[in-house]
Image (spheres, rainbow, N blue to C red):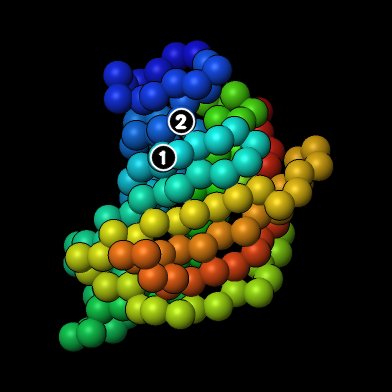
Amino acid sequence: MNTTSESIAMTDQKPTTADIQLIQKILPHRYPFLLVDKVRDIVPDTSAVGIKNVTMNEPHFTGHFPGNPIMPGVTIVEAMAQTAGVMAGISLDLEDRELLVYFMTIDNCKFRRMVVPGDVLEMHVEVLKKRSKMWRFKGVAKVDGEVAAEAEFAAMIDLKD
């Protein structure tokens, strides 16, 4: 496997941590819609933890809400899905393969705490089921150990080529 950084830990030839360079080799997302800065604790086909450093410089804060910036719930769910996409991409050895991940369902979504600039959002995702191109995940987003959002979601993982 071709790694992009010495900081990427390896287990059984698969990374257990993904820095931003590896994330961009797996996900097609780019600014302003790349919502994961790092993924750690990657257990292929099982789970991972994504990290998002929430800053005031993000474009959604100009309108959500002026004078009271709150990260939109849909972007929190998207960050969980991107974390799952990185874990799935590593599980399937899809680095540099133009991976596409499409939402199929979002179920049991709940928002428990506001996420604001200065927070470090941790997206804990685990695989509930996988079958061919269809994967089902459970995600829990936390700030300082407190649940901010949770959801179950399914995605179709496909290759562009």
Rendered residue at 34%/37% (across/down): 20
Asked if residue 84 lies left or right of residue 10, the reply is: right
Q: Position of residue 110 (x, y in %)?
A: 55, 78
Q: Is residue 98 above or below residue 130?
A: above
Query: Mark 2 touching mark 1, by CB under 8 A?
Result: yes
The Cα–Cα distance between marks 2 and 1, rounded to whole angstroms, is 6 Å
Q: Position of residue 52 (x, y in %)?
A: 34, 54
Q: Is residue 112 above or below residue 101?
A: below
Rendered residue at 42%/72% (across/down): 148
- Looking at this view, name the residue that lies furthest to the front: 145
Can the viewer see residue 16 in this picture? Answer: yes
Rendered residue at 22%/69% (across/down): 117
Residue 121 sits in quarter: bottom left
Q: Amino acid at mark 2?
A: Thr
Decide which of tag 2 and tag 1 comes sooner along the chain.
2
Q: Position of residue 157 (x, y in %)?
A: 68, 42
Nearer to me, 65 or 80: 80
Nearer to me, 150 or 70: 150
- Helix, strand or loop at disc 2? loop
User: Label for residue 16?
Assistant: 2
Q: Position of residue 3 (x, y in %)?
A: 40, 18
Asked if residue 2 lies left or right of residue 105, the reply is: left
Task: Give the residue at mark 1.
Answer: 40
Rendered residue at 39%/24% (across/down): 9
Q: Amino acid at mark 1?
A: Arg
Q: Crowding at label 1, few (<14), some or many (≥20) Cα neighbours within 10 Å?
A: many
Asked if residue 109 lies left or right of residue 82, the reply is: right
Can the viewer see residue 82 in this picture? Answer: no
- Helix, strand or loop at disc 1? strand
